[in-house]
Amino acid sequence: MERANDSTFSGFILLGFSNRPQLETALFVVILIIYFLSFLGNGTIILLSIADPHLHTPMYFFLSNLSFMDLCLTTCTVPQTLVNFKGKDKTITYGGCVTQLFIALGLGGVECVLLSVMAYDRYAAVCRPLHYMVIVHPQLCLQLVVTAWVTGFGNSVVQTALTMTLPLCGKNQVDHFFCEVPVMLKLACTNTSINEAELFAVSVFFLVVPLSLILVSYGHITHAVLKIKSAQGRRKAFGTCGSHLLVVIIFFGTLISMYLQPPSSYSQDVNKSIALFYTLVTPLLNPLIYTLRNKEVKGALKRLTLENCGSDEGDMEENYRQEKSILS
């Protein structure tokens, strides 16, 4: 890369919304609140999935992985964004940019595969309930999750290497609030048609294929739900499936609009708005839609709270007895 021949290269400048300082101030507050709520929600899901034996099931194993992935994704991009919005220094080192691009791209690929795995899990639970534990056994769960992480980060290694070795000819102003492949391709000063074609093919594999599998799975689930005789049961099932599909459509829709078009046709303001959705909104919605409304999670949270209160009361009683014995 040409930066190697330039001893004055000090990194990239993340422009973000620097031409709209009032918008940056408002976004700083909004993003900070969303990040806090997302961290709290996803952290709660991980804690409950580990602490409560009732949640040691395939579904919550997948959901805890999704929550961990969302925590990593927001932590990878949000702190740098907040620093850039609040401070005057909007630079990021070359190594920081490479790391950010690698982690964000890898986690995005993991989530695409993981959401399709979760759709298959729901299909097996609803359409094959008697054989569910035989189909979705613990070994298969582990294999599917490992496959998701290896596939996502394996692709990220290739994409990061291909993108960050392009010549920039001294350009270092990134019109975005974090380092991302389409934006970095647009920054390059050479023909990137091969990179764009390769990115399109990979995006089809990670976006169109998983989305198709998810839609097929929920099509079978819908068919099974229609056979439920209880109208209340049907409404509850459709409400759950509808909320799940809403999250899927938001996540995949924003990514498809970003990655399945040539970088030359991007509108940067639209591009930034889309990026805010899949790096902030989706990680916030996932714990709300998938788990925190479930009776099992509410029950686990209640049991954990009661156990902590019970242990605190037990400690207080023990201390009281000890003090009483000393005084007597």
Image (cartoon, grey):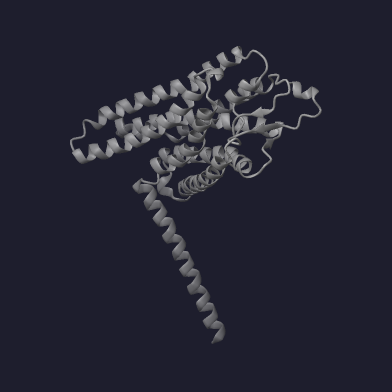
Q: Quadrant of the N terminus?
A: top right
Residue 97 shown left or right of residue 10 in the figure: left
Q: Residue at x 44, y 65 (%)?
A: 310
Q: Compared with residue 114, is residue 290 higher up or lower down, i.e. above or below?
A: below
Toward the viewer: 201 or 94? 94
Residue 322 shown left or right of residue 1 in the figure: left
Q: Residue at x 53, y 29 (%)?
A: 269
Toward the viewer: 165 or 5? 5
Q: Is residue 288 visible?
A: yes
Residue 15 shown left or right of residue 206 in the figure: right
Q: Residue at x 43, y 40 (%)?
A: 285
Q: Residue furthest bottom?
A: 328
Toward the viewer: 183 or 95? 183
Residue 80 percent coordinates (x, y): 62, 40
Can you tell which quarter of the image residue 2 is in? top right
Q: Residue at x 24, y 38 (%)?
A: 235
Q: Is residue 148 visible?
A: no
